[in-house]
Image (cartoon, coloured by chain):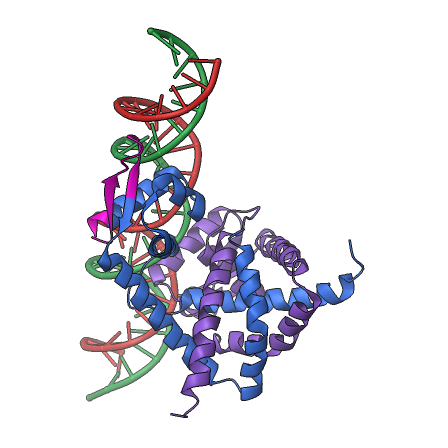
Chain colours: A purple, B blue, C green, D red
Amino acid sequence: MEPKTNLTELNVSDFAMAFEELTRLFIRMPSIEKLSFTTLSVLHTLSLRSPMRLSELIATEQVTQSAITQLVTRLERDGLVERRPDPSDGRAVLIHITPQGASVIDSRRSERIMRIAKLIERLSPEERAAIASALPALTRLAEFGNA
Amino acid sequence: MEPKTNLTELNVSDFAMAFEELTRLFIRMPSIEKLSFTTLSVLHTLSLRSPMRLSELIATEQVTQSAITQLVTRLERDGLVERRPDPSDGRAVLIHITPQGASVIDSRRSERIMRIAKLIERLSPEERAAIASALPALTRLAEFGNA
DNA sequence: AAAATTATATCATCAACTTATATAAATGTC
DNA sequence: GACATTTATATAAGTTGATGATATAATTTT
């Protein structure tokens, strides 16, 4: 609506490209545990909000009920989560993250921070400062995803 | 090695967190064509460097030979790529992207730019300017991935 | 010429996703 | 309260996407 099209459009296109590349880099980043995006995402969400219902996870993770049910079954098999009845609704179960599941997320997070640190080291102080001052904006962008 | 640990570490941790969230947002971003990461990545790589050998794609995409062979077989089935003999090596095939495959990548890219533009609109001019000045640094970060 | 390496196809298996179906519990309507 | 509708979740069947293993042909090395 606003005639900032020229400036916004140029920024966005370059930004989008850079971010796509960074996303690719991240996805392909080696990891101790070879877990899928959704697995990690579910565990991450549970590490923040455990316990949760399956229906809640379906909403946060944007995959089908069946996929979540099956993933939780596998995670339960591997000891990363537990199913418990929901006392407030006989149809539902509550998914609890186990200490083992939580430690997967913790170690994963630490590892990725270390890897990113390695990359950041290769930037100049000016480049780092620029990223630092953009960080609040990037953080805000990220929050839009939870809206 | 350098005693910038404090500043770098603080930045990196926050940056990493914001970055993880943004990555999640991007991965979960809805799309007209529901294609997997590796599918898109292969098509993207081919759109830049077609034709390529399977062995080259194995290296760029960081998955096994078997996975690439099978994926290319499916993409060929769907008309997005073509296999042709490599005249310089009787064992090899060259994978060419088709116009259809290229248009998948193009439309995907345009769509994502539009979606990101929508998000960027919600930032203030100051926030946008901060991201714009960080963009060269982010772009540099992204390039480390191709090293 | 034979051995070793390279390039790729295929098989078997499991994870991860989809749609479809089924069942039980909860809620809404009369 | 009886019945209809909705909700929550398990499961089946199928495809895709990944792995390791195996096989075959072409090329390179010895």
Whole-percent x, y for residue A62 in the image: 39, 67
Question: Residue at 44% of width from left, 89% of height from top?
Answer: A4
Quadrant assignment, res B126: bottom right
Whole-percent x, y for residue D22 in the image: 34, 23
**How many numbered marks does the figure carry?**
0
Whole-percent x, y for residue B80 in the image: 24, 54
Taking depth in this image into account, of B140 and A77 the one nearest to the observer is: B140
Whole-percent x, y for residue A125 in the image: 70, 67
Magenta region, residue range: B76-94
Name the side, left or right, on which D8 lies relative to A113: left
Asked if residue B87 lies in the magenta stretch, the reply is yes
Taking depth in this image into account, of B129 and A68 the one nearest to the observer is: B129
The outermost residue toward the front is B88
The answer to whether any part of residue A50 appears in the image is no
Residue B132 vertical placement versus B68 (above, below): below
The outermost residue toward the bottom is A2
